[in-house]
Image: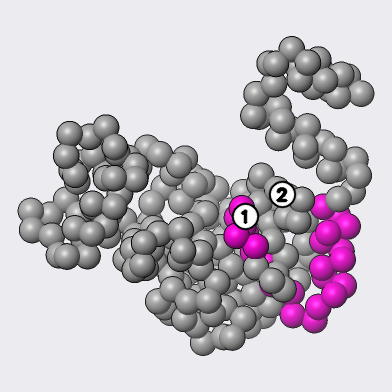
Amino acid sequence: MKFLKRVITKILGGELDHPMILKYQLWRRKILGQDRRMKESYLDSTEHPKLHIGASDHLLDGWLNTDICPLKEVMFLDATKKYPFTDSSFAFVFSEHMIEHVSRPDGILMLEECFRILRPGGVLRIVTPNLETIMGIYAKELSSQQQDYLDWMSGAFTPDAPEASSAYVINAFFRLWGHQFIYDESTLIVALKAVGFSRIKRFSLGESSFDSLRGLENVERYPAGLLEFESICLEVTK
């Protein structure tokens, strides 16, 4: 109750900052058992559970959508802590443009937990920006796709730059959005193998060997083709 009184006092005084709002929301959800009920209801409803990590507002039908900043229909999950699921709970796990927002050690913990909660033969589909692509736009000669990406990123995220500059865009990519560690394909594969995953295969966005893993990515948030250009998409089997 002391925490709630502090929150109310700060609301009335106009002093409430975002971390305290989130802390209050999570405290209230825990008291009400909202996330526990969401988890239990979902797992009771399906024989082939599918976990979506870092959903934000991109909600997937038939999946347990989770995020560290949960919405009403999204379960709270800190992907860098032990997950509130028993071993071998899920048939599929999906995470898009999330692992780059945590440190490399926390990313390894995330992958370890994904491995733990997947059933034998279960599949993790992970999508993240490709360091090789980002650094590639620093070349002297750019392909048309590289130039399209540079122009769009410049206009969207470095509007104060004097020109569409690779240096400004690359700096923005590493400094904005809370990015912590950007993987290239080989570095991500090494991390996945280290926690036990095998049968690693790269796919284009929207494509998969499994019906449940097709068409999941939020490609509409970028101009056509640019999210595909920026991303690595791997599927790995337990």
> Residue 48 colored magenta?
yes
Q: State the image coordinates of residue 86 (x, y, percent, origin top left).
A: 79, 65
Q: Is residue 184 above or below residue 71?
A: below
Q: Is residue 10 above or below residue 163?
A: above
Q: Looking at the figure, which quarter contains the C terminus?
A: bottom right
**Label 2 amino acid?**
Leu
Q: Residue at (17%, 34%) from the top-left corner?
A: 162
- Pick whichever, 228 or 236, lies toward us: 228
Q: Is residue 21 visible?
A: yes
Q: Is residue 200 visible?
A: no
- Magenta region: 35-59
> Residue 227 colored magenta?
no
Spatial CA span between label 1 and label 2: 8 Å
Name the side, left or right, on which 16 lies relative to 6.
Answer: left
Q: Is residue 101 above or below residue 39?
A: above
- Pick whichever, 138 or 122, lies toward us: 138
Q: Looking at the figure, which quarter contains the N terminus?
A: top right
| Between discs 1 and 2, the one toward the N terminus | 1
Name the side, left or right, on which 198 lies relative to 115.
Answer: left
- Give the residue at mark 1: 57
Secondary structure under the numbered disc 2 in the rendered image: loop
